[in-house]
């Protein structure tokens, strides 16, 4: 993967300066819990997100928020873990979707990246960026490009000395990342580490 990605001279500098190589890991098959955790962490620092996540888990028997229990929980109960009313509602939406059922790993993993994005963004509160993070870190898909992630935008602007903004910036990023295929996930992970920026925020609306 690195051999392919270092064809881009800018990215080559990033990869060669990184002492630890990026590698894909075994998938995390509990997509429901991964999606819940992703929503909990939106717009929060890593430390704050981890604290709220642990408080949220502690609300449930054996520290596992089954979809059935989450749906039955009151919004106030969920908020007691530190969630906003909006996030509590979104998590209940995810739980309801899981009950249907709609979050089985083996079934979802037969779909393309775009099919998974279209399927999961049917859930109110789940945007494209959230699913892209899921594809990268839960499904361990190798070729996801998080064009809406603020950290990736900032890293690419700095690395390639770009002056474009908004839509023009995204178009330029997509053009730059074309040469990274089929390993754009790996490229993004190198860029996050180089920028020292974890994927916790996005420009998705």
Image (cartoon, rainbow, N blue to C red):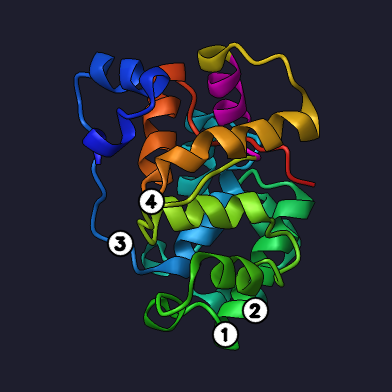
Q: Give the extent of the magenta segment.
A: 148-157
Task: State the residue position of label 4.
Answer: 182
Q: Position of residue 201 (x, y in %)?
A: 63, 35
Residue 138 occupies quadrant? bottom left
Whether 151 is among the magenta residues is yes
CA neighbours of label 3 inside 10 A, class few (<14), some (14 to 19), many (20+): some
CA neighbours of label 1 inside 10 A, class few (<14), some (14 to 19), many (20+): some
CA neighbours of label 4 inside 10 A, class few (<14), some (14 to 19), many (20+): some
Q: Which mark is residue 26?
A: none
Task: State the residue position of label 1.
Answer: 99
What residue is drawn where x is 55% and y is 30%?
152
State which tag comes first along the sequence, 2 or 4.
2
Task: State the residue position of label 2.
Answer: 96
Q: Position of residue 89 (x, y in %)?
A: 74, 62
Front residue (pair 60, 31)? 31
Q: Nearer the viewer, mark 3 or mark 2?
A: 3
Whether 122 is among the magenta residues is no
Task: Left or right? Give the position of 85 relative to 41.
Answer: right
Secondary element type, mark 3: loop
Asked if 35 appears above or below 69 in the picture, the reply is above
Asked if 175 appears above or below 69 in the picture, the reply is above
């Amino acid at each position: 993967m690195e051999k392919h990605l270092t064809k881009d001279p800018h990215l080559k500098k990033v990869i060669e300066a990184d002492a630890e190589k990026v590698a894909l890991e075994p998938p995390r098959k509990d997509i429901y819990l991964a999606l819940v955790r992703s929503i909990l962490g939106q717009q929060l620092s890593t430390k704050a997100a981890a604290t709220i996540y642990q408080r949220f888990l502690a609300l449930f028997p054996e520290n596992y928020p089954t979809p059935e229990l989450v749906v039955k929980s009151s919004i106030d109960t969920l908020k007691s873990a530190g969630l906003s009313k909006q996030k509590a509602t979104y998590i209940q939406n995810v739980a309801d979707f899981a009950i249907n059922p709609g979050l089985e790993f083996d079934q979802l993993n037969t779909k393309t990246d775009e099919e998974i994005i279209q399927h999961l963004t049917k859930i109110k509160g789940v945007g494209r960026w959230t699913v892209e993070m899921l594809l990268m870190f839960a499904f361990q898909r190798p070729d996801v490009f998080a064009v809406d992630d603020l950290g990736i935008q900032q890293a690419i602007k700095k690395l390639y000395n770009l002056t474009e903004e908004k839509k023009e910036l995204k178009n330029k990023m997509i053009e730059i990342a074309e040469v990274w295929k089929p390993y754009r996930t790996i490229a993004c992970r190198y860029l996050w580490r180089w920028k020292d920026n974890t994927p916790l925020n996005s420009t998705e609306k």
